[in-house]
Amino acid sequence: MYETIAFYLFSALTIVLFLITVMSKNVLYAMTALASGMVLISGFFFILGADFLGVVQLIVYVGAVMALYSFAMMFFDATRDIKEKNTPASLVFLLGGLSALVLVLMFAAPIHSEAVQALYPIHEGVGNAQDVGIVLFTKYLVPFEVAAVMLLVAMIAGIILAGKKMDQSLTSDMDVDAEDEILTQKDAK
Amino acid sequence: MIGLSHYLIVSAILFSIGLMGVLRRRNLLMLFFATEVMLNAVNIAFAAISHFYNDLTGQMFAFFIIAIAASEVAVGLGILIVLYKKQGSLDLDDLASMRG
C-alpha cells in the first residue's frame, strides 16, 4: 500500500522535475530541478531494497556531481536566461516518435523470463550493503579497480583542464583597460 | 501492486525526456543535464530488474554507471570551462566553426 503511494508520488514528481530540467531556460532552475529529481530517484532505490545504491546515489550524484555543476556555474553567467535556437519541433517530434516506437517494440518483445537465472542472488536476512560488498569485492574486483583508475584519470584531467589560468576572470567582460590594469598589478608584484 | 513493468515504464518515460532534451538543446551545459537525466533513468531500470529477478548484477551495473557519470562530469566540465574561456559562449551553433 505504502509502496504503491510512494511509487506514484515519486514517479510523478520525478517526471515533472526532469521536464523542468529539460525545458527551462534558466540554468539555476534546471540545476535545482535536476538535484531534487535525483533525490527522488534515490527514493526509488530505497523502495526497491537497494539501500546501498540509494545512499551512493545521494552522496555521489546529489552531493558531488551537483556541487561540481554549481561550482562550474560560477564560471559561466548563470543568472542570465539562455538564448538558444532550439532544433525545429518537427524534427524533434519525428525523432522522438521513432525512439518511442523502438521502446514499444522493446517492451513488446518476448522475454524469456523463465530462462533468466540469478547469477548472484540477493540473500534473505543479510543487509544489502554486506551483500553488495561481497559481490563487488569478489566477482567484480577487476572492474572496480578499473573504475578507480578511471576516476583518478578523470580527476587529473579535470584539475588540469580547469586549473589553467585560474587568475583570469571569465564572467566580467574584460576590456582593454581592465587587462592593462591587471598587467600593471602583476608588474607591481 | 507495483510490478516490474511499472518501473520499466517510468524509466522509459524519464529516458525519453532526457532524449528529448538531448535533441532540442543547443547549450552545452543543458545538454549535460539531459544526459544526466538519461543515466538516472537507466539506473532505475537496473535497480528494478535487480529487485524483481532477485539478482545483484543490476545493482553492480548501476554502481559502475554512477562512477562513469561522475568522471564524465569532471572531464566534461573542465572542457566546458576551457571552451568558455576560448569562445565566450557555450552554444553549439557558435562552435560550428568548420564550414564544409
Image (cartoon, rainbow, N blue to C red):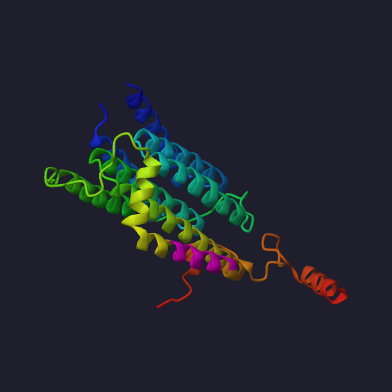
Furthest residue toward right: A188
Query: Residue A68: x percent and y percent?
Result: 56, 54
Query: Residue A60: x percent and y percent?
Result: 49, 49
Question: In the image, is residue A151 part of the stretch drawn in magenta?
Answer: yes
Which part of the image, by quadrant, shows the N terminus of chain A? Answer: top left
Query: Residue B28: x percent and y percent?
Result: 49, 59
Task: Out of A22 and A12, give the one closest to the viewer.
Answer: A12
Total marks placed: 0
Residue B20 appears in the rendering: no
Which residue is found at the position 84% from the left and 74% from the top? A184
Which residue is found at the position 22% from the left and 41% from the top? B53
Magenta highlight: main SS: helix
Residue A136 appears in the rendering: yes
Residue B51 vs residue A167: left or right? left
Furthest residue toward top: A1
Whether residue A97 is situated above or below residue A180 in the rendered picture: above
Which part of the image, by quadrant, shows the C terminus of chain A? Answer: bottom right
Query: Residue A149: x percent and y percent?
Result: 45, 66
Task: Out of A144 and A107, give the one closest to the viewer.
Answer: A144
Residue A31 vs residue A92: left or right? right
Whether residue B62 is situated above or below residue A162 in the rendered picture: above
Which residue is found at the position 17% from the left and 48% from the top? A105
Task: Out of B4 and A54, give the one closest to the viewer.
Answer: A54
Magenta residues (range): A148-159
Task: Out of A135 and B58, give the one closest to the viewer.
Answer: A135
